[in-house]
Amino acid sequence: AQSVVIFGTTGSGKSSIINILLESEEAPASNDAIGCTATNDDYLFSIDERKYRIWDTPGLNEGSEGLVPAEVALKNLKSFVKELMRDKNRTPLFILCIEGSLDVKAQLRHYDSLKSTIRDAPFSIVVTGMDRCSSNPWSQWWGEHQKILQSFGVASVDHACVCTL
């Protein structure tokens, strides 16, 4: 199965995206500032008979009182990514999940801290929480944040703006 790794801040919609792909509520999801994913949890699903293993990862911005403190979550994610990248025949797809109504620059820093580990692996961004954004239509969000996206070198990556209600 092709591996897909979803990463981002706590509450950015990582688990909700997975549940949409699975068409079920298998991945525990929450809107709280304290996350509900403590480990790298994998889920299998298929699209057009192609199998995928999607990895739900702990949020990267929890404080020391959270399930996984931010520094620990980032260190663990880097180790996990390095492990996945060892299989040169199955380079994973990495998806940064960001909450569109929150500080985009702060959320893009998570990609920045993983960029050297991900290297040339396929990478895309899913912007969630579009129901809470002022961008209308949602497709305008990307253009409105173009300068910040360019400053992180991600302005031209594949992306989707979604609502995960």
Image: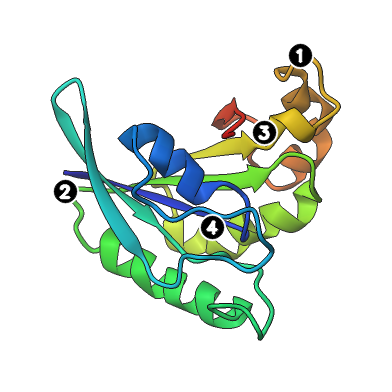
User: CA separation, marks 2 and 3?
Assistant: 27 Å
- The disc, 2 or 1, on the residue closer to the chain's N-terminal end is 2
- What residue would you read off at disc 1? 137
User: CA separation, marks 2 and 1?
Assistant: 39 Å
- What residue would you read off at disc 2? 89
- What residue would you read off at disc 3? 155
**Decide: marks 3, 1 in contact (CB < 8 A)?**
no
- The disc, 2 or 3, on the residue closer to the chain's N-terminal end is 2
> Which one is closest to the eye, mark 1 or mark 4?
1
- What's the amino acid at mark 4? Lys
* Identity of the residue furthest to the bottom in this view: 64
Callout 3 crowding tier (Cα within 10 Å): few <14, some 14–19, many ≥20: some
| Element assignment for label 1 | loop
Q: Which circle marks residue 115 in the picture?
A: 4
Identity of the residue drawn at 44% across and 61% down: 57
User: CA separation, marks 4 and 3?
Assistant: 14 Å
